[in-house]
Image (tube, helix red, strand yellow):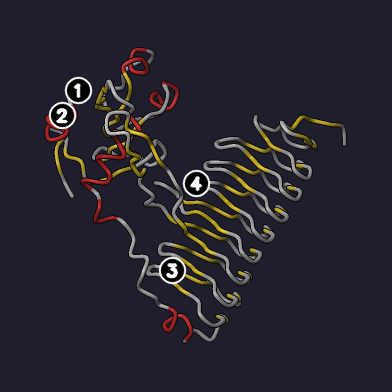
Amino acid sequence: MRFTLLDLTKEFSFKVVGNVNLLIDNLSSNKMMNKNSLGWAKNHNILSSFSSGAIICSVKDFKKIKQNQKVTYLISQENPRLIFSKIANHYFSSRKVDSHTNYYETHKQNNKIKIGQNAFIGENVSIGENTLIYHNVVIYPNTIIGDNCIIYSNTTIGTEGLGLTLDSHSNLYFKFPQLGGVIIESFVEIGPGSTIRRGALENTIISEGTKIGSLCNVGHNSLIGKNCILTCNVVTSGSSTIGDSVFMGVGSVVKQGLKVGKNSIIGQGAVITKNVPSNQTWVGNPATSILK
């Protein structure tokens, strides 16, 4: 789909600062922008980080920034996330993945991997050598799995997160686009019944050597570092960043968008509600630091 910003201003009553005739052909975050992409900003700090393309933003955030001449600003009186979701669902519906065509038989012919019975493997999935996929695993499209991985039964990879925004006018929820993928690097293990959500616009990444226990949830856009251990029932909410060599105890939770520094220990049942520095141990709800 290709359209100009002029088309959007007629539909959503934006105040445009910049090139109203800019051609848009893609959606992206602030980390992926190009001159013909459309993004949104949830605060003025993120808005300031955009260097090209068109950005949907609020009036108050626009007033706080220094304008970039390479950026076109679409200033809205409504929630920028909601407007972005509506545009994505209307103009980019063709980018939604096919979650029903099973390429199991194609991958089954690869003698460098092992796949159990009743697995689902979607389109555009890559599975590395010596990787073992157990029975009843579901791998959705746009997933990359490295070498020497083990994915245990009833795990789902690339599932869609909730990503909902309420429209106060219609009192209906709109789905934020879930168009990214999942990258699982080599020597990763994922326990039975766990789910790895695909990224919204970017990728969810599980780095090399990490071990994930059963019944865990890795939220969309999360980045899990190298050689981490996530024990059973661990939840990393959307856009969490877990540093290298982090240990997370049973039932621990990281709130959306937070960072846990490398070599840290998160105790059993701990709920992380603020960023955790490296080399610390945090316990409790809300979690606080204790001496190692």
Give me the C-alpha separation between circle 3 and circle 1. Answer: 40 Å
Give me the C-alpha separation between circle 4 and circle 2. Answer: 30 Å
- Disc number for residue 9: 2
Residue at image coords 16%, 46%: 2
Of 210 and 161, the residue lying toward us:
161
Residue tagged 3? 125
Residue tagged 1? 16
Residue at image coords 51%, 51%: 204
Give me the C-alpha separation between circle 3 and circle 2. Answer: 38 Å
Which amino acid does the dot numbered 1 rest on?
Answer: Val
Q: Earlier in the sequence, mark 4 or mark 2?
A: 2
Residue tagged 4? 221
Q: Which of marks 2 and 1 is nearer the N terminus?
A: 2
Classify residue 125 as left or right of residue 195: left
Give me the C-alpha separation between circle 2 and circle 1. Answer: 8 Å
Residue 97 rendering spot, x and y as whole percentages: 34, 60
Which amino acid does the dot numbered 3 rest on?
Answer: Val
- Whether the residues at callouts 3 and 2 have beta carbons within 8 Å, the answer is no
- Whether the residues at callouts 3 and 1 have beta carbons within 8 Å, the answer is no
Give me the C-alpha separation between circle 1 and circle 4. Answer: 29 Å
Residue at image coords 54%, 46%: 222
Residue 57 rendering spot, x and y as whole percentages: 32, 25
